[in-house]
Amino acid sequence: MAIIVNGERIEDSTIQGEVERLRPRYEEVFADMNSAEREKQLLEWSKQNVIEKALIKQEARKNGATILKADVEKVLENLKQDKDRADIYKEINAKDDEDARKVVESVLGTEHLLRGLYKGLPEPSKEDISKHYEENKEEFQTGEQVRVAHIVKYVDWRADETTAYNAIKKAQDELKEGKVFEAIVAKYTDCEDRGGDLGYIERGKMAEEFEDVVFNLGIGEVSDIFRTRFGFHIAKVYNRKPPAQLILEEVKEQITATLKEQMREKAFEDFIDRLKNKAKIEEV
Protein backbone atom coordinates (compact mmCIF):
# COMPACT_ATOMS: atom_id res chain seq x y z
CA MET A 1 0.00 0.00 0.00
CA ALA A 2 1.19 3.49 -0.87
CA ILE A 3 -0.37 6.95 -0.63
CA ILE A 4 -0.10 9.62 -3.32
CA VAL A 5 -0.42 13.19 -2.03
CA ASN A 6 -0.70 15.80 -4.78
CA GLY A 7 1.30 13.52 -7.06
CA GLU A 8 3.98 12.72 -4.43
CA ARG A 9 4.20 9.01 -3.66
CA ILE A 10 4.61 7.89 -0.05
CA GLU A 11 5.70 4.26 0.13
CA ASP A 12 4.35 1.72 2.59
CA SER A 13 7.77 1.57 4.26
CA THR A 14 7.38 5.22 5.31
CA ILE A 15 3.94 4.51 6.76
CA GLN A 16 5.22 1.46 8.64
CA GLY A 17 8.13 3.51 9.93
CA GLU A 18 5.64 5.99 11.39
CA VAL A 19 3.67 3.08 12.90
CA GLU A 20 6.77 1.87 14.75
CA ARG A 21 7.69 5.40 15.83
CA LEU A 22 4.26 5.89 17.42
CA ARG A 23 3.82 2.35 18.75
CA PRO A 24 5.56 2.47 22.20
CA ARG A 25 3.63 5.46 23.53
CA TYR A 26 0.45 4.50 21.67
CA GLU A 27 0.32 1.00 23.16
CA GLU A 28 0.93 2.43 26.62
CA VAL A 29 -1.98 4.88 26.33
CA PHE A 30 -4.40 2.45 24.65
CA ALA A 31 -3.40 -0.71 26.50
CA ASP A 32 -7.03 -1.54 27.34
CA MET A 33 -8.21 -1.43 23.73
CA ASN A 34 -8.82 -4.62 21.78
CA SER A 35 -5.52 -5.46 20.03
CA ALA A 36 -7.02 -5.67 16.53
CA GLU A 37 -8.85 -2.35 16.92
CA ARG A 38 -5.75 -0.78 18.43
CA GLU A 39 -3.62 -1.88 15.48
CA LYS A 40 -6.20 -0.60 13.01
CA GLN A 41 -6.34 2.80 14.70
CA LEU A 42 -2.54 3.02 14.96
CA LEU A 43 -2.23 2.40 11.21
CA GLU A 44 -4.86 5.03 10.42
CA TRP A 45 -3.22 7.64 12.65
CA SER A 46 0.15 6.86 11.07
CA LYS A 47 -1.31 7.37 7.59
CA GLN A 48 -2.75 10.72 8.62
CA ASN A 49 0.58 11.76 10.12
CA VAL A 50 2.58 11.03 6.97
CA ILE A 51 -0.08 12.76 4.82
CA GLU A 52 0.05 15.86 7.01
CA LYS A 53 3.86 15.89 6.95
CA ALA A 54 3.83 15.63 3.16
CA LEU A 55 1.32 18.47 2.82
CA ILE A 56 3.33 20.74 5.12
CA LYS A 57 6.56 20.01 3.24
CA GLN A 58 4.86 20.71 -0.08
CA GLU A 59 3.46 24.01 1.22
CA ALA A 60 6.87 24.96 2.61
CA ARG A 61 8.51 24.31 -0.77
CA LYS A 62 5.86 26.34 -2.54
CA ASN A 63 5.43 29.30 -0.20
CA GLY A 64 8.25 29.04 2.32
CA ALA A 65 11.48 30.99 2.58
CA THR A 66 14.67 30.17 0.73
CA ILE A 67 16.83 28.13 3.08
CA LEU A 68 20.52 29.01 2.99
CA LYS A 69 23.03 26.17 2.58
CA ALA A 70 25.06 27.66 5.43
CA ASP A 71 22.09 27.25 7.80
CA VAL A 72 21.67 23.62 6.74
CA GLU A 73 25.35 22.88 7.29
CA LYS A 74 25.27 24.57 10.69
CA VAL A 75 22.43 22.32 11.84
CA LEU A 76 24.24 19.21 10.59
CA GLU A 77 27.46 20.23 12.32
CA ASN A 78 25.61 20.75 15.60
CA LEU A 79 24.05 17.30 15.28
CA LYS A 80 27.41 15.70 14.60
CA GLN A 81 28.88 17.20 17.77
CA ASP A 82 26.49 15.17 19.92
CA LYS A 83 25.87 11.98 17.94
CA ASP A 84 27.49 9.49 15.59
CA ARG A 85 26.69 9.92 11.92
CA ALA A 86 24.87 6.57 11.79
CA ASP A 87 22.66 7.62 14.72
CA ILE A 88 21.88 10.92 12.99
CA TYR A 89 20.89 9.12 9.78
CA LYS A 90 18.62 6.78 11.73
CA GLU A 91 17.01 9.58 13.73
CA ILE A 92 16.12 11.73 10.70
CA ASN A 93 15.52 8.81 8.32
CA ALA A 94 18.36 9.68 5.92
CA LYS A 95 20.65 7.42 3.91
CA ASP A 96 23.72 9.68 3.62
CA ASP A 97 24.92 13.26 4.05
CA GLU A 98 23.20 14.49 0.91
CA ASP A 99 19.93 12.93 2.00
CA ALA A 100 20.43 14.42 5.48
CA ARG A 101 20.88 17.89 3.96
CA LYS A 102 17.56 17.53 2.17
CA VAL A 103 15.83 16.47 5.37
CA VAL A 104 17.31 19.37 7.35
CA GLU A 105 16.42 21.85 4.60
CA SER A 106 12.85 20.55 4.66
CA VAL A 107 12.67 20.86 8.46
CA LEU A 108 13.99 24.42 8.39
CA GLY A 109 11.48 25.32 5.69
CA THR A 110 8.66 23.83 7.73
CA GLU A 111 9.75 25.72 10.85
CA HIS A 112 9.76 28.98 8.89
CA LEU A 113 6.29 28.24 7.54
CA LEU A 114 4.89 27.52 11.00
CA ARG A 115 6.50 30.63 12.53
CA GLY A 116 4.67 32.66 9.91
CA LEU A 117 1.44 30.83 10.72
CA TYR A 118 1.73 31.66 14.43
CA LYS A 119 3.15 35.17 14.05
CA GLY A 120 -0.15 36.98 13.71
CA LEU A 121 -1.94 35.27 16.57
CA PRO A 122 -3.30 37.72 19.18
CA GLU A 123 -2.35 37.78 22.85
CA PRO A 124 -4.92 36.15 25.15
CA SER A 125 -7.31 38.81 26.47
CA LYS A 126 -7.86 39.56 30.16
CA GLU A 127 -11.37 38.19 29.76
CA ASP A 128 -10.09 34.89 28.28
CA ILE A 129 -7.51 34.52 31.05
CA SER A 130 -10.10 35.19 33.76
CA LYS A 131 -12.59 32.80 32.16
CA HIS A 132 -10.00 30.00 31.95
CA TYR A 133 -9.12 30.53 35.61
CA GLU A 134 -12.75 30.40 36.75
CA GLU A 135 -13.50 27.30 34.66
CA ASN A 136 -10.41 25.42 35.84
CA LYS A 137 -9.93 26.54 39.43
CA GLU A 138 -9.28 23.00 40.63
CA GLU A 139 -6.07 22.99 38.57
CA PHE A 140 -4.72 26.01 40.44
CA GLN A 141 -4.48 24.73 43.98
CA THR A 142 -1.56 23.85 46.19
CA GLY A 143 -1.70 20.65 48.18
CA GLU A 144 -0.94 20.35 51.87
CA GLN A 145 2.60 21.56 52.61
CA VAL A 146 5.12 21.16 55.41
CA ARG A 147 8.36 22.98 55.97
CA VAL A 148 10.88 20.31 56.83
CA ALA A 149 14.59 19.80 57.42
CA HIS A 150 16.38 16.49 57.59
CA ILE A 151 19.57 14.70 58.40
CA VAL A 152 20.28 12.14 55.69
CA LYS A 153 22.92 9.47 55.23
CA TYR A 154 22.84 8.15 51.68
CA VAL A 155 23.23 4.46 50.92
CA ASP A 156 25.27 4.56 47.73
CA TRP A 157 28.89 4.60 46.60
CA ARG A 158 29.79 6.61 49.70
CA ALA A 159 28.44 4.18 52.29
CA ASP A 160 26.81 0.78 52.52
CA GLU A 161 23.66 0.05 54.55
CA THR A 162 25.43 -0.65 57.84
CA THR A 163 27.82 2.30 57.65
CA ALA A 164 25.05 4.74 56.80
CA TYR A 165 22.79 3.48 59.60
CA ASN A 166 25.57 3.59 62.21
CA ALA A 167 26.35 7.19 61.25
CA ILE A 168 22.77 8.42 61.54
CA LYS A 169 22.33 6.46 64.79
CA LYS A 170 25.07 8.65 66.28
CA ALA A 171 23.07 11.71 65.27
CA GLN A 172 19.98 10.25 66.92
CA ASP A 173 21.94 9.50 70.09
CA GLU A 174 23.02 13.16 70.32
CA LEU A 175 19.41 14.28 69.86
CA LYS A 176 18.36 12.00 72.71
CA GLU A 177 21.09 13.61 74.85
CA GLY A 178 19.29 16.92 74.37
CA LYS A 179 21.34 18.51 71.60
CA VAL A 180 19.46 20.83 69.26
CA PHE A 181 18.56 19.40 65.85
CA GLU A 182 19.94 22.42 63.97
CA ALA A 183 23.25 22.14 65.79
CA ILE A 184 24.01 18.63 64.60
CA VAL A 185 22.71 18.67 61.03
CA ALA A 186 25.95 19.90 59.47
CA LYS A 187 27.94 17.41 61.53
CA TYR A 188 26.14 14.35 60.17
CA THR A 189 24.07 15.01 57.06
CA ASP A 190 25.09 14.28 53.47
CA CYS A 191 22.82 17.15 52.37
CA GLU A 192 24.34 20.26 53.92
CA ASP A 193 22.58 22.94 51.84
CA ARG A 194 20.67 25.36 54.06
CA GLY A 195 21.33 23.22 57.11
CA GLY A 196 19.35 20.36 55.65
CA ASP A 197 16.30 22.64 55.32
CA LEU A 198 14.16 21.50 52.36
CA GLY A 199 11.79 24.44 52.70
CA TYR A 200 8.11 23.82 52.08
CA ILE A 201 7.36 20.57 50.29
CA GLU A 202 3.98 19.77 48.81
CA ARG A 203 2.31 16.42 49.29
CA GLY A 204 2.79 14.26 46.22
CA LYS A 205 6.07 15.86 45.15
CA MET A 206 8.62 13.88 47.19
CA ALA A 207 9.36 10.18 47.66
CA GLU A 208 6.28 8.48 49.13
CA GLU A 209 8.17 6.89 52.00
CA PHE A 210 9.55 10.32 52.97
CA GLU A 211 6.11 11.95 52.85
CA ASP A 212 4.56 9.12 54.88
CA VAL A 213 6.73 10.23 57.81
CA VAL A 214 6.95 14.02 57.55
CA PHE A 215 3.27 14.66 56.86
CA ASN A 216 2.45 12.79 60.06
CA LEU A 217 4.74 14.86 62.28
CA GLY A 218 3.54 17.76 64.40
CA ILE A 219 5.13 21.21 64.25
CA GLY A 220 8.48 21.06 66.03
CA GLU A 221 8.44 17.26 66.15
CA VAL A 222 11.52 15.21 65.21
CA SER A 223 11.11 11.77 63.64
CA ASP A 224 12.80 8.50 64.47
CA ILE A 225 15.27 7.11 61.94
CA PHE A 226 13.47 6.02 58.79
CA ARG A 227 14.54 4.52 55.47
CA THR A 228 13.76 5.72 51.96
CA ARG A 229 15.11 4.60 48.59
CA PHE A 230 17.94 7.11 49.08
CA GLY A 231 19.12 6.16 52.53
CA PHE A 232 18.41 6.89 56.20
CA HIS A 233 16.77 10.07 57.48
CA ILE A 234 15.81 11.95 60.61
CA ALA A 235 13.35 14.76 59.85
CA LYS A 236 12.00 17.78 61.70
CA VAL A 237 8.86 19.71 60.75
CA TYR A 238 8.82 23.49 61.33
CA ASN A 239 5.46 24.54 59.94
CA ARG A 240 2.41 23.32 58.03
CA LYS A 241 0.19 24.88 55.37
CA PRO A 242 -3.24 23.50 54.43
CA PRO A 243 -4.29 23.13 50.79
CA ALA A 244 -4.89 26.56 49.26
CA GLN A 245 -6.45 28.12 46.17
CA LEU A 246 -3.94 30.13 44.15
CA ILE A 247 -5.20 33.56 43.14
CA LEU A 248 -5.45 34.56 39.49
CA GLU A 249 -2.41 36.82 39.62
CA GLU A 250 -0.23 33.92 40.80
CA VAL A 251 -1.12 31.74 37.78
CA LYS A 252 -1.68 34.42 35.14
CA GLU A 253 1.55 33.63 33.26
CA GLN A 254 0.80 29.90 33.33
CA ILE A 255 -2.71 30.46 31.95
CA THR A 256 -1.41 32.83 29.28
CA ALA A 257 1.07 30.20 28.09
CA THR A 258 -1.69 27.57 28.02
CA LEU A 259 -4.02 29.78 25.99
CA LYS A 260 -1.25 30.67 23.55
CA GLU A 261 -0.53 26.99 23.01
CA GLN A 262 -4.24 26.32 22.42
CA MET A 263 -4.30 29.13 19.83
CA ARG A 264 -1.28 27.64 18.06
CA GLU A 265 -2.88 24.18 18.05
CA LYS A 266 -6.13 25.59 16.63
CA ALA A 267 -4.26 27.59 13.96
CA PHE A 268 -2.31 24.47 12.98
CA GLU A 269 -5.42 22.27 12.81
CA ASP A 270 -7.21 24.85 10.64
CA PHE A 271 -4.14 25.12 8.41
CA ILE A 272 -3.96 21.34 7.96
CA ASP A 273 -7.69 21.17 7.22
CA ARG A 274 -7.30 23.81 4.48
CA LEU A 275 -4.42 21.88 2.92
CA LYS A 276 -6.35 18.59 3.03
CA ASN A 277 -9.48 20.15 1.54
CA LYS A 278 -7.66 21.28 -1.58
CA ALA A 279 -5.28 18.28 -1.83
CA LYS A 280 -5.59 15.21 -4.02
CA ILE A 281 -4.94 12.17 -1.83
CA GLU A 282 -5.10 8.60 -3.16
CA GLU A 283 -4.35 5.18 -1.67
CA VAL A 284 -2.87 2.78 -4.25
Image (cartoon, rainbow, N blue to C red):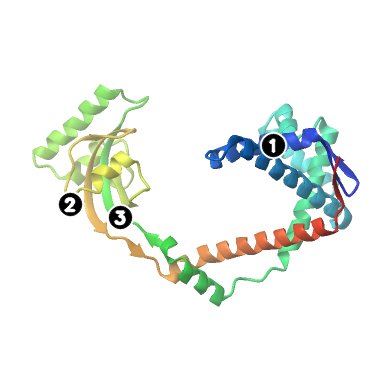
Left/right of residue 84 with respect to residue 166 in the rendered view: right
**Residue extending furthest toward the left:** 177
Residue kind at label 3, given as amino acid type: Gln
Residue at the limit of the structure toward the bottom, as seen here: 127
Dividing the image into 4 quarters, which one contains the N terminus?
A: top right
- Crowd band around label 2 with a 10 angstrom C-alpha radius: few (<14), some (14–19), many (20+): some
Q: Between tags 1 and 2, which lies in front?
A: 1
Q: Is residue 206 left or right of residue 32?
A: left
Can you tell which mark lies on residue 145? Answer: 3
SS for dot 1: helix
Q: Are marks 3 and 2 in contact (CB under 8 Å)?
A: no
Q: Earlier in the sequence, mark 3 or mark 2?
A: 3
Task: Determine the residue positioned at 84% across, 35% down.
Answer: 99
Question: Compared to 115, does 207 lie above or below?
Answer: above
The label shown at residue 133 is: none
Helix, strand or loop at disc 3? strand
Which is in the foreground here, disc 3 or disc 1? 1
Q: Earlier in the sequence, mark 3 or mark 1?
A: 1
Q: Position of residue 78 (x, y in %)?
A: 71, 39
Identify the residue at horizontal 61%, vertical 64% (top origin). 260
User: Disc 3 versus disc 2: distance between alpha carbons?
Assistant: 12 Å
Q: Where is residue 136? Give x, y as percent.
A: 46, 65
Could you tell whether 4 is left or right of 251 in the image? Answer: right
Label for residue 19? Answer: 1
* Distance from the alpha carbon under mark 1 to that under mark 2: 54 Å
Q: Position of residue 95 (x, y in %)?
A: 81, 30
Q: Quadrant of residue 112?
A: bottom right
Q: Residue furthest right?
A: 7
